[in-house]
Amino acid sequence: MLTFDQARDWLLQRAQPLAATERAPLLAALGRTLTEPLTAAVDVPPRDNSAMDGYAVAVSSLGGEPLPLSQRVPAGSVPQPLAAGSAARIFTGAPIPPGADAVIMQELAEMLPDGRVRFAQAAHPGQCIRRAGEDISAGQQILAAGRRLTPADIGLAASIGVDSLPVRRALRVAVFFTGDELVEPGQALAEGQIYNSNRYWLVPALMALGCEVIDLGIVRDSLAATREALRDAADCADVIITCGGVSVGEEDHVKAAVEAEGELTLWKIAIKPGKPLAYGRIGQADFIGLPGNPVSGFVTYQTLARPFLQKRAGQPVTAGFDERYPAAFAWERPDARREEFLRVRREMADGGWRLRLYPQQGSGVLMSCAWAEGLVRLAPGQSVRPGDALPFMPLAD
């Protein structure tokens, strides 16, 4: 069996980033990888504007006497030059009238019965004014190529008038789930059946990476059905991911089906949970076989499959155990031959973060994954005493 590091490096070496690109409308670009730098063609804001509701004035005209109002300037309007010795009522985002050089917030102003306005304190030039180009200047690069687009990135692109972005084509990932015992939520369970929980963490996890998911549903436990599903998946996907059927039981057909339809080049890793993880190729598609036990599948996805998919999609690889925190638990029965990944949560205690362990670490206890904030990685045979500093990987980027 390969070690965890060997398996991760092996997978990343085989993850070839997509070359195909396309332009995606902004609302379809979340999670996609930008292929070209984005440069602004306009200033943001495009002109000097008011940072708040108040009164636009020329500082030189302020002498302690009330000023008459000469105009009203809402956002989206085009103001007239400010009349000498007057103030303009102005609202947040409205352009500054020519001749005005400060805005006094309305809380510092008093309207008099005769229609003039008196100010409680003096102003200085530039007060409460957002200058043209203060956020973004024309010609400025605002997003670098290779960036995985966030909601803020997409809003930033919209702020310079861009309606679509050059991105890598979305990675197409076909998924299916094996097992005669599986039924979908909402159906009544017969004796011996369980709900297909793997589908409902895996598909959203893939969507969160920006993948285009092709969901082939539940495939029954037969070699012929599994081979047919693999052929269908390879025809339309860049990557095929299955849950279950990669062990050596009489009803585990995925391994044999992959070997019949393509090649299987990685099988079994010295980790717990998640030993039966498989990698291969079917036609032009990569194949990843996750274990069927929910926790085993979840952990191997987070630690091994997700980095592979990130690189395959041209995204930065983020999954790593780069943080260390002291344990608030003991682990006294380590596995002597396999690395272990424990589900933990960070909690504040004694003035610092401590790692709390979920009490049930079995491979079928999906509650541990929903409860956990991250994973701890232990070497084979490594026991834990309270206070030991442990490598930690958050489950969310």
Image: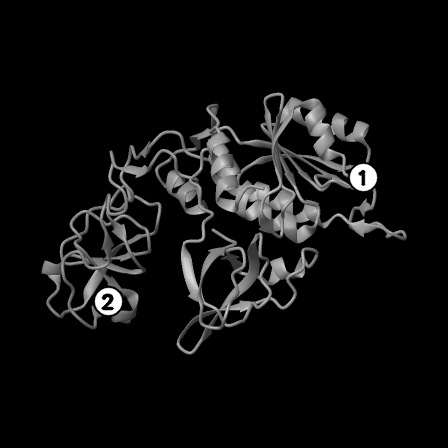
**Coordinates of residue 343 in the picture (x, y in percent):** 57, 60
164, 345: nearer the viewer: 345
**Coordinates of residue 211 in the picture (x, y in percent):** 56, 36
- Cα gap from disc 2 to disc 1, whole angstroms: 84 Å
Q: Which colour scheme is used?
A: one colour
- Name the residue at 45% across, 30% down: 167
**Placement of 172 over or under 60, stated as above or below:** above
**Placement of 370 over or under 167, stated as above or below:** below
**Coordinates of residue 200 in the picture (x, y in percent):** 68, 48
Left/right of residue 265 with respect to residue 394 in the rendered view = right
222, 99: nearer the viewer: 222
- Name the residue at 16% across, 54% down: 101
Q: What kind of element bears circle 1?
A: loop
266, 115: nearer the viewer: 266
Q: What kind of element bears circle 2?
A: strand
Q: Residue 251 carries which label?
A: 1
Determine crowd level at label 1: few under 14, some 14-19, many 20+ residues with C-alpha closer than 10 A: some
The residue that disc 2 covers is 117
Q: Can residue 2 be seen in this view?
A: yes
Amino acid marked by disc 1? Glu
Amino acid marked by disc 2? Val
**Coordinates of residue 369 in the picture (x, y in percent):** 61, 58
Q: Which mark is residue 299?
A: none
Quarter where residue 87 is shown: bottom left
Q: Does label 2 or label 1 sit earlier along the sequence?
A: 2
Left/right of residue 195 with respect to residue 336 in the rendered view = right
Left/right of residue 277 with respect to residue 156 in the rendered view = right
